[in-house]
Image (cartoon, grey):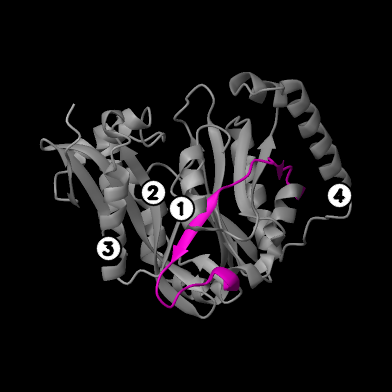
Amino acid sequence: MSAEFEVRPYAAGDEGEIVPLLEEVFGGWPHLDIESPLDYWRWKYLKNPLGKALVVVALSSGRIIGCHHSVCLKLKLRDDVVSCISATDLAVHPDFRGVGVGRRMDELFNRFQEERRIGFVYWITGNPELIASSKRGSHRFPLPITNQVRIRNIDKQLREMPVEHPRFIKIGYDVAKRLNRFENIWNKPRPTKKDYQSSSINSFDERIEQFWRDASSGYDFMIWRGRDFLNWKYHDKDCGAFEVRQATEGDKIVGYCVFRINMYLSEYPIGYVVDLLTYPDRLYVADALLGDAVKYFDAQDVNIVNYQTIRGHPYEAIARRHGFVDSRIKMHMFYTCHGEHDVSSEIAKSKMNRVLLSWGDHDVLPVRLP
């Protein structure tokens, strides 16, 4: 097959070829229980209120054989809010690998970043080749990211997701649970105010803007979460079904929690605590909201639940109190900085409680252990 190809920006209608390519390369896409992958692609890359995505495609003989995507975001970086993107779906047809398709798409992609003055680009990956290449030209996120996991029946987990040396994995998990229970003797539940309430919501109202401004003041690094963005991300019909719990004290929003059951593997659904945010001085709200999520998953008979956070963040201790343990699986997150926003050392100097990351910041919910 000819290795000749061209690279250009996305044009309206390209998604009709992009989605089948993603499905072929990834063995199905996006690995979520959604009604239409095509509508999901349009939701993810065209409907974002922060702007249409950066999308580059490669073509050979008029056929799309490669694609490079990103999602437009904003990043709160200490006292500033900077333009940011999350690099997401990158795919090259197997017949065109090793001839520079990915490199050429990267070159155009990087040019677009500079033209739009995007200061920060990040991505998370479990692909060994991408991990190796990212180490060469990018920064590894300097703080430890942990995936906390809550498994009700470890034997069932090992049957459904076989691993090497299952006996040792089971012993390790059982030991972690025992240590967790011992630690929780001192990690007592936090008292909840009498006027605290939580409820499921179908959309965020205007009060979430004030909550975001106030809550984010306690962080040096976190993805921006405005009203329009949150409603697009968690309440659009094409993104799938999320459960959103909002906490209030009187008329004031004091926190929210987003969780989801990924039914892509219908025989073994996987739970995710996707996003959790409260006022830094309202940890009892985070405790109560995470408790709501656990009850929801248990009622739906979900055996495994994942929750991502920064190791040492106060939410990690709260998760442990609700039965989560460190999965010990390394999370590979990389980033690049452009222009005046070279923050490599600044992030590393931040305290654990002033950095927030969650599964919702990555636009991926793996159907296997991450």
Q: Which image quadrant: the C terminus?
A: top right
Q: CA distance from mark 4 to mark 3?
A: 50 Å
Q: What's drawn in magenta, residue-wise?
A: 321-346
Point out which mark residue 55 bears: none
Which SS class for mark 3? helix
Q: Residue at 53% of width from left, 66% of height from top?
A: 222
Q: CA distance from mark 2 to mark 4?
A: 38 Å
Furthest residue to the top? 159
Q: CA distance from mark 3 to mark 2?
A: 17 Å
Q: Residue at 34% of width from left, 31% of height from top?
A: 25
Q: Amino acid at mark 1?
A: Trp
**Which callout, 4 or 3, points to the residue nearer the camera?**
3
Which comes sooner in the sequence, label 1 or label 2?
Answer: 2
Is residue 112 or residue 229 the one in the foreground? 112
Q: Residues within 10 Å of mark 2 (few under 14, many from 20)?
A: some
Which comes sooner in the sequence, label 3 or label 2?
Answer: 2
Q: Is residue 340 in the magenta section?
A: yes
Q: Give the left or right position of residue 203, taking residue 303 as reference.
A: left
Give the residue at mark 4. Answer: 183
Give the residue at mark 1. Answer: 123
